[in-house]
Image (cartoon, helix red, strand yellow):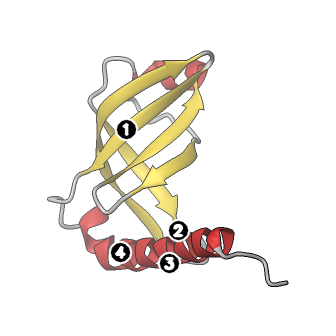
Amino acid sequence: MTGGEIKSELIDMSIHGMQVRAPRALVKELDGCNHVSLRFKLPNRNEEISGRGAILRRVQSRDMVTLGLAFDLLQEQGISKHTAALNSWLVHRANEISKWDSSLTKPNAA
């Protein structure tokens, strides 16, 4: 890619990568690209995370494209220097989801 920016919706994230969705018209400029530069912030965090990601998968559904991206964790000044913050956020998020799940399965008190 030649320096353009594509804003996308986060679908899922792990310590190894993320899945994002964006309009096909915007993602079209990534056709033929195997890697992208990533830049994002975690909720309630000020520090921006940036680095390189490999495009592992592209799935088109109507006018949207979902991209599966793997973080380049070998770049020292890239996303790898943020793995502690990513891991902390992911653990927090998993705990929140677990609370939601358990509240859905508890019987209502009579």
SS at circle 1:
strand
The amino acid sitting under disc 2 is Leu
Distance from Cα at disc 2 to Cα at disc 1: 18 Å
Residue at the limit of the structure toward the left, as seen here: 74
Above or below for 60 versus 4: above
Q: Answer few, some or many: residues within 10 Å of disc 3's Cα (few below 14, many 20 plus, some between 14 and 19).
A: few
Give the spatial CA distance, label 1 vs label 4.
19 Å
Residue 49 placed where, x, y %? 42, 65
Q: Residues within 10 Å of mark 4 (few under 14, many from 20)?
A: some
Please identify, in this view, whether the residue under mark 3 or under mark 1 is nearer the observer: 3
Callout 2 environment at 10 Å: few (<14), some (14 to 19), or many (20+)? few
Mark 3 lies on residue? 95
Residue with the mark numbered 2: 42
Residue 55, quarter of the rendered image: top left
**Label whose residue precedes the other's in the sequence (2 or 3):** 2
Task: Please say whether residue 5 is visible from this viewpoint.
Answer: no
Q: Secondary structure at mark 4?
A: helix
Report the amino acid beneath label 3: Asn
Picture disc at residue 68: 1
**Left/right of residue 23 with respect to residue 35 in the rendered view:** right
Place of residue 47 in the rendered image (x, y in percent of width and height, measured from the top left): 49, 75
Q: Which residue is mark 4?
A: 87
Q: Which element type, helix, strand or loop, lies under badge 2?
A: loop
Between circles 2 and 3, the one closer to the viewer is 3
Residue 98 visible here: yes
**Label 4 or label 2, whichever comes before in sequence order:** 2
